[in-house]
Image (cartoon, rainbow, N blue to C red):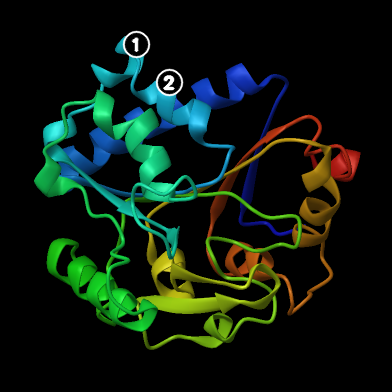
Amino acid sequence: MNQQAVLNIIATHTELYRAVAQEWVLLARAAIRARGKFCVALTGGNTPRELYRLLASDEYAKEIDWSATQIYLGDERYVPQDHPDSNFGMATATLLNHVPIPASQIYPMPTQATASECANDYAQTLQRTVAVNAAGIPVLDLILLGMGEDGHIASLFPGADALDVHDRICAAVFVPHLAAWRLTLTYPVITAARQRIIMLTGNNKAKILAQVLSDKIANDLPMQRIALAAPTTWYLDTAAASELPRNKT
């Protein structure tokens, strides 16, 4: 099993989201103390909804310096921000509308121009607002991630051309089986982040998780590429972890 993976297997969803919220608080405090701001990329989908609601609650919101927090997205559907499928729309409704973060520190992925133009624009936004490393790659403090049943991460799907993009920060991706465009951060940005947290729940993720964390390398598993390239912290419920070897957990 990948030795760079830190596995936190937690019995209930409530406990899982509380553990991630507490880690968010600690990471935010450390980043602000060290660099004066906390730059985090959010994930979409259903799994993070309860986490965002928890972060917006009185218990956690008061523990976070939102005035020093900058919000980005790891990927986005190519739809207007008020569309039901918008990742930014979901994050706004569950978190951003309920915490005192300045609007000028929230950076949604644009979707008003062509997908390629929007990706280029977001890359420029990241380079302008986030400190870059020696390779010119923005270094986020935290990227929250989920994983699909096919092993996709952000909008890096198996077989997508974007899997081999190393000279761009953000890419436009056409997903044939969805017949839709997506915008996504690329591998260089995801692996350059100071911390990656992946949340998985449910039996439907158990099989693919076991494949990703196995010693067998599969080039068609986007999440495995990241897990092998950079230290990654996993928060799993017992259902998602059910097919991991017992001696590895």
Q: Position of residue 222 (x, y in %)?
A: 65, 70
Sequence-wise, the earlier of marks 2 and 1 is: 2
42 versus 152 height, above or below: above
Q: Residue 54 bears which disc, if any?
A: 2
- Horizontal side, residue 155 vs residue 126: left or right: right
Residue drawn at (33%, 18%) of the image: 60
125 versus 74 height, above or below: below
Q: Secondary structure at mark 1?
A: helix
**How packed is label 2: few (under 14 Cα within 10 Å), some, or many (20 or more)?**
many
Q: Residue 21 bears which disc, if any?
A: none
Looking at the rendering, which quadrant does residue 45 occupy?
A: top right
Q: CA distance from mark 2 to mark 1?
A: 8 Å
Residue 143 appears anywhere in the view: no
Residue 198 appears anywhere in the view: yes
Q: Which residue is mark 1?
A: 59
- Horizontal side, residue 118 vs residue 226: left or right: left
Q: Nearer the viewer, residue 56 or 40?
A: 56
- Amino acid type at circle 2 is Leu
User: Which image quarter holds the C terminus?
Assistant: top right
Q: Nearer the viewer, residue 34 or 48?
A: 48
